[in-house]
């Protein structure tokens, strides 16, 4: 048993089952280390040898302990969100946990959004949505951790706002926090020796901190898992087809009332009721198959073609795929019908629409982003 085997880097209990949890070590590495009795978990191993951090997620209890720690700290909070999945990026109750500490809100994955979208307009939109969630950021920034766009100016602004304090970087899983931290590490040459890992007292949690010039630290915290993301219901191959990889090219569909769009087999949109034909703009991964049909035939069509013409999910994984659940909305302004983790459809004011998503995935209506 590995029960009392601990990583000599971060102190986590060694385990071989869950790649994304603390202490994960491949069985092969474990075998080798049994002779010496010294072992690094995969995360610490990568950090030591490749100067690279890997994502890690937490249980709710550990996350709560972490948030409490943040409340007691005197720090700048850098709150990273995925702008393509803004609602899926919200941390419930974050505003209570940051205490008096200032929050800088950073929208990541800016590279995915269409060029036509003005940064200033998007920042306003983000600010309004975060105010609704109880968060009053001192600043809103847009970056792409992947392409390195605006990471320089982000670092400058962090330095400006932190005013001799530590910096905590927080975010749910999959927003790109590891990618961003790795960019930051890469930009600070010779920082290798400066990265340390240490543990939050009372939790199984290790944090990675990077020393800043004045003796303060930039602390990377593990992401909390957001169960409602589409990502939990698809295998890796199918996920690649659903998660946007490149800049989104919006597609406009002219729909009459009682028409339906299928997004592969993972989601569905109905224009249920309205006065006339309208344009509906779809923001999803460019290569995702979209099929238009009549609402009246849609149920039958899905039953017949699910996993085959309507894919993903691919045929071998349709059995485990949850059934689609319907959510109906009436709009009183131009709105986005959001299917969490997939994207959104911009709909005009004064219509009735329905979004369908796998059971467990959120569907919601918000004020239009674009
Ligand atoms: P973490 O769980 O928050 O640490 O997220 P990761 O850094 O592991 O990133 C999650 C996924 O988002 C990966 O597939 C990344 O390649 C992708 N990703 C991260 N940053 C960006 C970005 O700026 N743009 C795009 N398009 N994808 C990104």
Image (cartoon, rainbow, N blue to C red):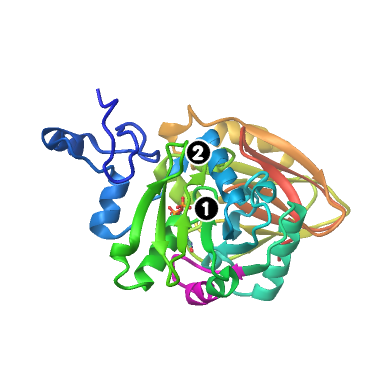
Residue 295, placed above or below residue 218? above
Question: Could you tell me which secondary element the residue under label 1 belongs to?
Answer: loop
* Mark 2 CB within 8 Å of ligand 1: no
What mark, if any, has residue 288 been given in the picture? Answer: 1
Residue 102 sits in quarter: bottom right
The answer to whether residue 297 is above or below residue 338 is above
Q: Are marks 1 and 2 in contact (CB under 8 Å)?
A: no
Residue 238 placement: quadrant: top left
Circle 2 Cα neighbour tier, 10 Å, few/some/many (<14 / 14–19 / ≥20): some
Horizontally, residue 69 falls left or right of residue 198, namely: right
Q: Element type at marker 2?
A: helix
Judge by depth and name the residue closer to the eye, 167 or 338.
167
Report the residue at 16% width, 37% height from top.
33
The answer to if 299 sits in the magenta stretch is: no
Q: Name the disc covering residue 232, or none.
A: 2
Q: Which residues are magenta?
A: 141-156
Residue 241: image location, x then y, percent: 47, 50
Identify which residue, 208 or 363, lies in the foreground: 208
Badge 1 or badge 2: first in the primary sequence: 2
Decide: few, some or many residues near mark 1? Use Cα within 10 Å; few <14, some 14-19, many ≥20: some
- At horizontal 61% and vertical 49% (from top left) the residue drawn is 71
Task: Give the Cα distance between marks 1 and 2.
Answer: 18 Å
Residue 259 in view here: yes
* Position of residue 325 in the picture relative to residue 233 (left or right): right
Instruction: Classify 96 as above or below 6.
Output: below
Q: Residue at x 62, y 62 (%)?
A: 105
């Amino acid at each position: 048993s590995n029960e009392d085997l601990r990583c000599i880097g971060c102190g986590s209990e060694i385990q071989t089952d869950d790649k994304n949890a603390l202490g994960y070590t491949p069985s092969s590495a474990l075998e080798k280390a049994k002779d010496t009795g010294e072992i690094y978990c995969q995360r610490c191993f990568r950090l030591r040898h490749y100067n690279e951090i890997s994502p890690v997620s937490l249980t709710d209890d550990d996350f709560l302990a972490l948030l409490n720690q943040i409340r007691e700290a005197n720090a700048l909070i850098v709150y990273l969100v995925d702008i393509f999945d803004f609602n899926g990026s919200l941390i419930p109750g974050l505003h209570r946990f940051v205490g008096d500490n200032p929050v800088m809100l950073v929208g990541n994955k800016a590279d995915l959004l269409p060029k036509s979208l003005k940064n200033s307009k998007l920042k306003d939109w983000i600010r309004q949505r975060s105010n609704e969630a109880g968060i009053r950021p001192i600043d809103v920034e847009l970056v792409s951790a992947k392409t390195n766009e605006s990471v320089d100016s982000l670092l400058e602004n962090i330095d400006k706002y932190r005013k001799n304090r530590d910096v905590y970087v927080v975010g749910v899983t999959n927003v790109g926090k590891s990618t961003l931290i790795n960019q930051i590490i890469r930009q600070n040459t010779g920082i290798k020796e400066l990265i340390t890992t240490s543990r939050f007292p009372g939790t199984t949690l290790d944090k990675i901190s990077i020393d800043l010039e004045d003796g303060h630290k930039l602390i990377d915290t593990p992401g909390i898992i957001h169960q409602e993301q589409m990502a939990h219901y698809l295998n890796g191959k199918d996920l690649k087809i659903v998660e946007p990889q490149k800049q989104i090219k919006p597609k406009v569909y002219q729909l009459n009332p009682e028409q339906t769009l299928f997004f592969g087999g993972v989601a569905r949109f109905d224009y249920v009721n309205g006065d006339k034909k309208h344009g509906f703009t779809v923001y999803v991964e460019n290569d995702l198959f979209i099929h238009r049909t009549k609402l009246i035939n849609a149920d039958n069509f899905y039953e017949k073609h699910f996993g085959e013409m309507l894919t993903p999910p691919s045929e071998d994984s349709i059995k485990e795929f949850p059934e689609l659940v319907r959510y109906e909305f009436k709009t009183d302004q131009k709105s986005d019908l959001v299917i969490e983790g997939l994207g959104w459809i911009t709909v005009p004011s004064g219509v009735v629409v329905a979004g369908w998503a796998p059971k467990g995935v959120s569907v919601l209506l918000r004020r239009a982003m674009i």
